[in-house]
Amino acid sequence: MFGGIHLFSMEQITRLSKQEFVTRFRQRTKQLALQVIRFSQQLPRTEEATIMKRQLLRSATSVAANYRAACRARSAAEFHAKLSICVEEADETLFWLELLTESETVLSSTTAPLLQEASEILFVLSKARKNTTK
């Protein structure tokens, strides 16, 4: 369980209808954004942390916003383009979380659940993009 959303395994994903998957995954990306917002409120008030916090907030919220937009795409090409943005932003979210940890701005125990969730989201988005025609 992460942020109130049950994390579903790959086996469970294959059993969901397309619409149910889209609904759950949209909630999951939004939940990650909310978790990052809450996490960022606890960051130290240093110049370095503030810079990383802004970048992290921008990328994590962008994943959710662009996935939502992808779900409303008017064509396969538009869907692929929006998914590509989601993949880039999810990867960037991972980068900022890693940087916060490796710079010892925060303890790894505080970023571990966010890193795990962002990694799983990135995996699903990458797989979806790969399976989508341009």
Image: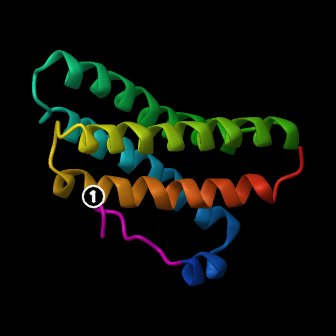
Q: Position of residue 128 (x, y in %)?
A: 71, 58
Q: Residue furthest top?
A: 47
Q: Is residue 37 left or right of residue 82?
A: left
- Check disc 1 and report its element: helix, strand or loop: helix
58 in magenta: no
The residues colored magenta run: 1-9
Residue 46: x, y in percent? 13, 20
Give above or below for 40 relative to 7.
above
Judging depth in this view, the residue of 44 and 103 nearest the camera is: 103
Q: Which residue is mark 1?
A: 112
Quadrant for the N terminus, please: bottom left
Q: Residues within 10 Å of mark 1 (few under 14, many from 20)?
A: some
- Snapshot quadrant of residue 73: top right
Residue 72 sits above or below residue 1 on the image? above
**Residue 29: x, y in percent?**
46, 49
| Residue 126 visible to the viewer | yes
Relative depth, front residue between 59 and 72: 59
Q: Is residue 75 visible?
A: no
Q: Residue at x 14, y 33 (%)?
A: 43
Q: Is residue 5 magenta?
A: yes
The structure residue drawn at horizontal position 52% and vertical position 43%, both measured from the top left corner, is 91
Identity of the residue drawn at 31% across and 26% down: 52
- Residue 12 vs residue 6: left or right? right
